Image (cartoon, rainbow, N blue to C red):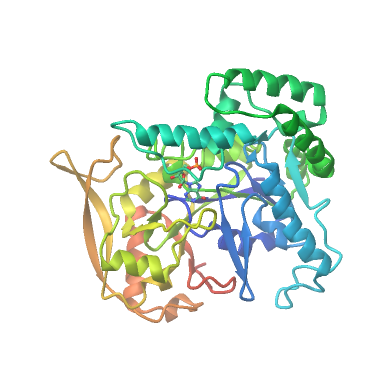
């Protein structure tokens, strides 16, 4: 029997995956992060309180749910420590947290609920410095442009992994090995105008080894055992398909496989373990960082989406670029991920607009195409829809305005993928489910 469902973004990240994972997590025994690092940011709003999650899977707010940071993730221990402390404090001081859902009780704690793969790779101070160094260098090079990374050391940590110089979580428990590997890596960086102190890194890692030892495990074995015991698993993607290292808008992408391939390689599960793949998209489109964005708006409508949608990065606070929905890009993402159904977020943000547009094709080298070409040097072709009002907080499809229904039905028609969930506000309960 297939035990795992995958949730992943089908745009440039920030689709609102956190809310979907959060609302589904109660049905699962495990929620698993499989790629990326603390460049990701999921904001959960529960009873008007905001929770920012960067590395810890969104199932952490449900006591029945075990949470795994899988082997495909890159971990900054400092960031993880702060995030864990936030929940440790919350759990130790809160009596029956969330009266509406009864999700947590006062004796909840993270041990036995959070597992960190011993195969995951670590982000070290030199990765962060290198990230910034490489970005500056790109920005200064004629003909190139900075990627606009989050500056968190994600790319350099994955580079070390692929070039087989990475330091894995399991390495921090053997100081001799750790010392040898760190020293060799610093030799590789010696030609750069950057300075690193190996002793302070070792001493920091010594502290982290103590702190994280109760959480480190062979998470692949845990997952294999859980599939043998018919446990339900939710795999939680970070970033989005258009930021995928292979299938996104390279080089303006992140350094991991954000799609279905990452869900398998970043956990140890195989294709037969997967039941459904849920593609999460916003009702419009946003992007943070540089790189081509065919439907980007530089006008009043773009500013409207940014303000009303509160489109500012959870991790970096950067304003997100906003634009109309690009269905060509979404179809591309649905195809390479094998999405079985879609969740559409933030439909309420479009309320009050007189006209809503959707990109249904590209003009490319004098032709009209409906796929993403290699260089994406395209002009979008739009279909226009009459606007609507009143979708905020609606929980039944029949109660949506006819124009909003038409918009959603068109998305289904164009993509050939079923729309399963529609989110109508940031609140956990404001979701329409279409059976
Ligand atoms: P990096 O992942 O920090 O290397 O950044 C590479 C690109 O991915 C940049 O354009 C970032 O803005 C983007 N990016 C990384 N993480 C996220 C995310 O969680 N949401 C949206 N964009 C992201």
Q: Is residue 151 above or below residue 403?
A: above
Q: Is residue 345 above or below residue 402?
A: above
388 sits left or right of 224 in the view? left
- What is the x, y in percent for residue 407? 33, 67
Task: Give the quarter of the image for residue 128.
Answer: top right
Residue drawn where x is 54% and y is 74% of the image: 430
- What is the x, y in percent for residue 413? 33, 59
The one nearer the camera, 206 or 276, is 206
Observer able to see residue 202: yes
Say which quadrant the N terminus sits in: top right
Residue drawn where x is 65% and y is 57% of the image: 58
Task: Give the quarter of the image for residue 176.
Answer: top right
196 sits left or right of 86 in the view? left
Observer able to see residue 271: no
Residue drawn where x is 76% and y is 35% of the image: 205
- What is the x, y in percent for residue 166? 64, 26
- What is the x, y in percent for residue 135? 44, 36
Q: Is residue 269 above or below residue 52?
A: above
Residue reaching furthest to the left: 366
Residue drawn where x is 40% and y is 71% of the image: 308
The one nearer the camera, 50 or 262, is 50
274 sits left or right of 95 in the view? left
The one nearer the camera, 288 or 101, is 288
**Count of numbered labels shown in the rendering:** 0
Residue reaching furthest to the right: 107
């Amino acid at each position: 029997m297939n035990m795992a469902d995958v949730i992943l973004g089908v745009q440039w990240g920030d689709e609102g995956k956190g809310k979907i994972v959060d609302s589904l997590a109660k049905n699962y025994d495990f929620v698993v992060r499989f790629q990326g690092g603390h460049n990701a940011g999921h904001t959960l709003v529960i009873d008007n309180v905001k929770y920012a999650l960067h590395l810890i899977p969104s199932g952490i707010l449900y006591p029945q749910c075990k949470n795994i940071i899988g082997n495909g993730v890159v971990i900054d221990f400092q960031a993880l420590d702060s995030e864990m402390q936030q929940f440790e404090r919350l759990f130790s001081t809160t009596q029956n947290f969330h009266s509406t859902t009864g999700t947590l009780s006062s004796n909840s704690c993270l041990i036995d609920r959070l597992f960190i793969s011993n195969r995951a790779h670590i982000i070290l101070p030199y990765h962060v410095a290198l990230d910034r160094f490489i970005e500056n260098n790109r920005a200064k090079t004629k003909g190139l442009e900075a990627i606009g990374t989050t500056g968190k050391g994600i790319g350099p940590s994955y580079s070390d992994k692929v070039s087989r110089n990475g330091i894995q979580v399991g390495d921090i428990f053997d100081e001799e090995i750790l010392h040898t590997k760190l020293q060799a890596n610093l030799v590789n960086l010696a030609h750069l105008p950057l300075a690193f102190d190996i002793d302070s890194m070792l001493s920091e890692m010594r502290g982290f080894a103590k702190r994280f030892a109760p959480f480190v495990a062979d998470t692949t074995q845990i997952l294999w055992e859980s599939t043998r015991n018919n446990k339900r698993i939710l795999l939680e993607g970070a970033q989005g398909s258009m930021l995928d290292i292979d299938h996104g808008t390279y080089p303006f992408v992140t350094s991991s496989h954000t799609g279905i391939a990452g869900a398998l390689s970043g956990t140890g599960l195989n294709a037969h373990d997967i039941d459904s793949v849920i593609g999460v998209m916003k009702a419009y489109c946003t992007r943070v960082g540089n790189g081509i964005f065919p439907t980007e708006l530089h006008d009043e409508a773009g500013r409207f989406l940014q303000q009303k949608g509160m489109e500012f990065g959870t991790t970096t606070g950067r304003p997100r670029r906003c634009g109309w929905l690009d269905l060509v890009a979404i179809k591309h993402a649905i195809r390479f991920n094998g999405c079985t159904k879609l969740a559409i977020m933030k439909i309420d943000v479009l309320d009050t607009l007189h006209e809503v547009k959707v990109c249904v094709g590209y003009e490319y080298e004098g032709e009209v195409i409906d796929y993403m070409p290699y260089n994406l040097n395209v002009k979008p072709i739009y279909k226009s829809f009459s606007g609507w009002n009143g979708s905020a907080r609606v929980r039944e499809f029949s109660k949506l305005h006819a124009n909003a229904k038409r918009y959603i039905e068109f998305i289904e028609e164009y993509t050939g993928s079923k729309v399963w969930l529609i989110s109508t506000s940031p609140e956990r309960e404001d979701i329409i489910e279409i059976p």
